[in-house]
Amino acid sequence: MECTVSWTGQTSAKSSMGFMAETGSGHAFMMDGAPDVDKPMNGGQNLAPRPMEMVLAGTGGCTAYDVVLILKRGRHQVTACSVQLQSTRAEVDPKVFNKIHMHFTLKGHQLNPQAVERAIAMSHDKYCSASIMLAKTAEITTSFEVLAEDAGV
């Protein structure tokens, strides 16, 4: 796996902390820093997600992928899955994640809550590389709800 991240450079009289990431699979996306009112030359322009937001989003994608795949392989009829992640970070550098809570919302035809709970546990304990890596510094907790087939996710 590979990725190249390049600073987009000074784009105006304002500070620029924008970065373009290009992945080995041929995809590109932007990242940026938050504007820093106290130190304007250190901040970004708020034009894209922060790098740590991307880490959190990637973790959500990794674990949701696992949960859906595990349920489908178990022949469960999952029709929707989302995961909301809430995190806190350390106060001092390096400002690692120290708590992450993942709340899964799933929908499916006669979706068994025990199967959902098992799929989430399997992702958390065995398959999701991102969450297992983040668990080295963060306490990760999970919760879930299974909605009726006609409910929105």
Image (cartoon, helix red, strand yellow):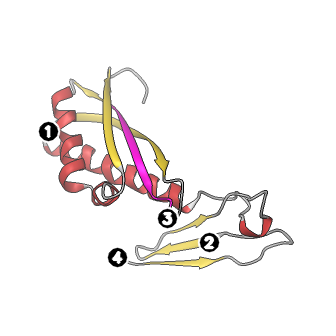
Cα–Cα gap, marks 1 and 2: 42 Å
Q: Mark 1: which amino acid?
A: Arg
In the displayed image of the protein, which residue is found farthest to the left? 74
Label 3 element class: loop
Classify mark 2: residues with Cα within 10 Å, few (<14), some (14-19) or many (20+): many
Where's residue 48, x and y in %? 64, 58
Q: Is residue 50 left or right of residue 4?
A: right
Q: Residues within 10 Å of mark 3 (few under 14, many from 20)?
A: few
- The residue where tag 1 is placed is 75
Secondary structure at badge 4 equals loop
Range of magenta residues: 95-106
Q: Where does residue 10 sit, x and y in percent of width and height?
A: 77, 77
Question: Is residue 146 shown left or right of residue 92?
Answer: left
Mark 4 Cα shell of 10 Å, populated few (<14), some (14-19), many (≥20): few
Find the residue positioned furthest to the front.
92
Inter-mark Cα distance, 3 to 4:
25 Å
